[in-house]
Amino acid sequence: MKKVLVTGAGGYIGRHVVSALLDMGAEVLAADFVADGIDCRAKTIQADIFSGSKTIYEDLGSPDVCVHMAWKDGFVHNSDAHMGYLSKHYEFIHNMTDGGLKQIAIMGTMHEVGYYEGAIDENTPCNPVSMYGIAKDALRRSTYQMLKDKDVVWQWLRAYYIYGDDERNHSIFSKIIQAEKAGQTEFPFNTGKNKYDFITVEELAKMIATCAMQTAVAGIINCCTGKPVSLAEKVENFLQEHHYKIKLKYGAFPDRPYDSPAIWGDDTKIRAIMSRKIESS
């Protein structure tokens, strides 16, 4: 049984990853400040992973792999916390791997890339435009340099446009739910022409868990569908599926000049991982 530590286990994505790992037969150590909502099959650890402890690896149960998902203000892209905590993330990963950790899977984001048109793969240049993207990009680069010559499997799991479990996130879908419940008849919208790679949080969690349960494929892994869909199409389908009465008011907001007209992930590596169901080496 593989022992997997999940940091940020009580977060929007983290709790789904914990359940997915447990369903795959892993022993899960779920670390977060608050244990509410975490799958009861996991062993919860309420600990400060950013304490700077040199023995943090042993303190957290000496796991076989760490899925590092903890991140403050993930939905607030220009929060000062992103850069403020960057060195703490680096220190945590440094102390974990120095202590004996042999596999680290770190949560990334397509916001590392910034403005780009087309499919993103592991070689796509990154020019982030938000503090969130800048901090994630810096963590990716620095941890790669830290571990490239060490006997540690480094996986950078890059996520895209996530939806599902919508009352727990801050996406346009959660805002539509709130507007529908408030009795609004219209929802202000832009043109909806921009195309993105949408993925449900449940599907994303299965991808993250499967990546962590194997070591044959490493490096940057796009956890995505590989299929660009227009925002308008996705939202209209969402309204129809939920039988909502609220209508989109197209053109109420202008399209933002820094939003990519069409951006999605290259799913070559994740398809190989998911289809082969690679066993840990």
Image (cartoon, helix red, strand yellow):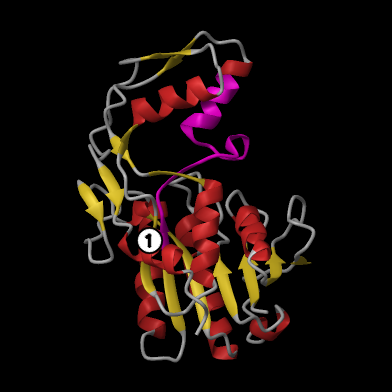
Q: Residue at x 57, y 24 (%)?
A: 177
Element at badge 1? helix
The correct choice, above or below, for 256 with respect to 225 in the image is above
Residue 237 makes an appearance in the image: yes
Q: Which residues are magenta?
A: 157-179
**In the image, residue 94 lies at what x, y percent?**
51, 82
Label 1 amino acid?
A: Arg
The reply, left or right, for residue 12 in relation to residue 156 is right
Residue 45 makes an appearance in the image: no
Q: Is 144 in front, or is 52?
A: 144
Q: Quadrant of the N terminus?
A: bottom right
**In the image, residue 68 lies at what x, y percent?**
55, 67
**In the image, residue 117 lies at what x, y percent?**
20, 46
The reply, left or right, for residue 218 in relation to residue 182 is left
The correct choice, above or below, for 240 with respect to 58 in the image is above
Q: Residue at x 51, y 62 (%)?
A: 208
The correct choice, above or below, for 232 with respect to 7 in the image is above
**In the image, residue 112 lies at what x, y percent?**
34, 57
Q: Residue at x 32, y 36 (%)?
A: 229
Q: Is 69 in front, or is 85?
A: 69
Q: Circle 1 sits on which residue?
A: 271
Q: Is 69 in front, or is 146?
A: 69
Q: Residue at x 64, y 83 (%)?
A: 57
Count of numbered tags: 1
Which residue reaches farthest front? 276
The correct choice, above or below, for 101 with respect to 104 in the image is below
Q: Is residue 9 magenta?
A: no
Label 1 packing within 10 angstroms: few (<14), some (14-19), many (20+): some
Which residue reaches farthest top? 185
